Image: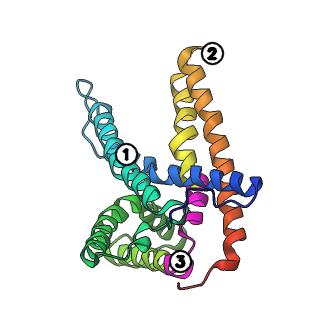
Amino acid sequence: DVSYGYKATNPSDLTFRIFNALGQISFAFAGHAVALEIQATMPSTPERPSKVPMWQGVMGAYFVNAICYFPVALICYWAFGQDVDDNVLRNLERPAWLIASANLMVVVHVIGSYQVFAMPVFDLLERMMVTRFGFKHGAVLRFFTRTTFVAFTLFTGVTFPFFGDLLGFFGGFGFAPTSFFLPSIMWLIIKKPKRFSITWLVNWITIVVGVCIMMASTMGGLRNIIADSSTYSFYA
């Protein structure tokens, strides 16, 4: 039997799980730090500024994101109800070929997307190694820093099996600022729109909502990590 009731045992638990869900959504639609890197490499002229194709690309990316994520979320919740796992593939028992194909697609997706999303981190680490520790730019430095970072994230992912709670925490703490209120703050500083105009109000509403999402999802993710820690099994 499939149950669609809440997992929460009391109102406070329900509230924090909603906060955590906001962080997971923020994580799923993050990537603005990478968007800046991509736009910086695009040719731009006064006749055809880079923001035109960039805007088209961003809209297309979000559309593809939506048609990939939302059907999976809705169908899996319809099929498994409240027992659906953070990793939906763990709920599947058959057919074997479908499970194997889905896992293969996940591997292909991660191999490609990891390189893109981690590029700002790679750049930060390499710049720090050069400026603070005197290393020289080159293939050896790139190999060392990138391999170390990948190994660290692999160890963390394998060791701590609280995937959903971590998504909520990092979605709020790390990605909500770059997705919601920091772009609005930068736009207000650069453009200096008239106070209480439509654009001024929209950006300030976005800032307030973004800060609330950041605080709520970070608290929700951290609280769920602590609350669910008794059921965790390392290297599970």
Which numbered disc flags the more N-terminal residue, 2 or 3? 3
Contact check, label 2 and label 1, Cβ < 8 Å: no
Vertical comparison of 215 with 168: above or below: above
Q: Which mark is residue 195?
A: 2
Contact check, label 2 and label 3, Cβ < 8 Å: no
Measured as percent of width and height from the top left, residue 61 is found at: 32, 45
Q: Which mark is residue 183?
A: none
Left or right of 67, for residue 173: right
Residue at mark 2 to residue at mark 3: CA–CA distance? 46 Å
Which numbered disc flags the more N-terminal residue, 2 or 1? 1
From the viewer's side, name the closer residue of 131 and 9: 9
Callout 1 secondary element:
helix
Predominant SS of the magenta segment? helix
Residue at mark 2 to residue at mark 1: CA–CA distance? 34 Å
Report the span colored magenta. Answer: 155-173
The residue tagged 3 is 156
Whether 159 is among the magenta residues is yes
The residue tagged 1 is 66
Q: Residues within 10 Å of mark 2 (few under 14, many from 20)?
A: few
